[in-house]
Amino acid sequence: MAKFTTVEVWVVVDEQGDYECAADFDAAAERFDENVGGNGGRRVVKLTVKVPLPTPIELTGEVEADPEPAELKVAWPTNAGGVL
């Protein structure tokens, strides 16, 4: 069975879709100010992801305009023909 770790990622996104991310809010906001800047609206999203080690996986998702806490579930095939 795969081992997992929990990862938190903070993403700051502006009205043009430009973004920066980091492991905590302050670092994400600082990186955004340094690399993107601007005075427009910003959205901050905190992602908490339980990640299997060491096999990499890519996820795609969409955040609603007025999000509420939710659970993201992902399934992918195993080498044994099952689904995790």
Image (cartoon, rainbow, N blue to C red):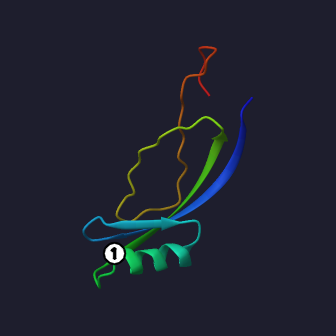
Residue at 48% over, 80% down:
30
* Residue 46 image point, x, y percent: 52, 64
Residue closer to the observer: 36 or 68? 36
Residue closer to the observer: 10 or 56? 56
Q: Secondary structure at mark 1?
A: loop
Amino acid identity at mark 1? Val
The residue carrying pointer 1 sits among few (fewer than 14), some (14 to 19) or many (20 or more) residues within 10 Å by Cα, namely some
Residue at 55% over, 79% down:
26
Residue closer to the observer: 26 or 71? 26
Classify the position of the C terminus by image quarter.
Answer: top right
| Picture quadrant where residue 9 is located | bottom right
Q: Residue furthest top?
A: 81
Q: Is residue 77 above or below residue 14?
A: above
Q: How many marks?
A: 1
| Picture quadrant where residue 19 is located | bottom left
* Residue 32 image point, x, y percent: 41, 75
* Residue 72 image point, x, y percent: 53, 46
* Residue 21 image point, x, y percent: 47, 65
Q: Residue furthest left?
A: 16
Q: Is residue 35 above or below residue 80?
A: below
Q: Residue furthest bottom?
A: 39
Q: Is residue 8 above or below residue 30?
A: above
For mark 1, what is the residue?
Answer: 36
Classify the position of the N terminus by image quarter.
Answer: top right
Left or right side of 18 for 70: right
Residue at 28% over, 81% down:
40
Residue at 67% over, 52% down:
6
Left or right side of 31 for 19: left
Q: Is residue 61 above or below residue 65?
A: above
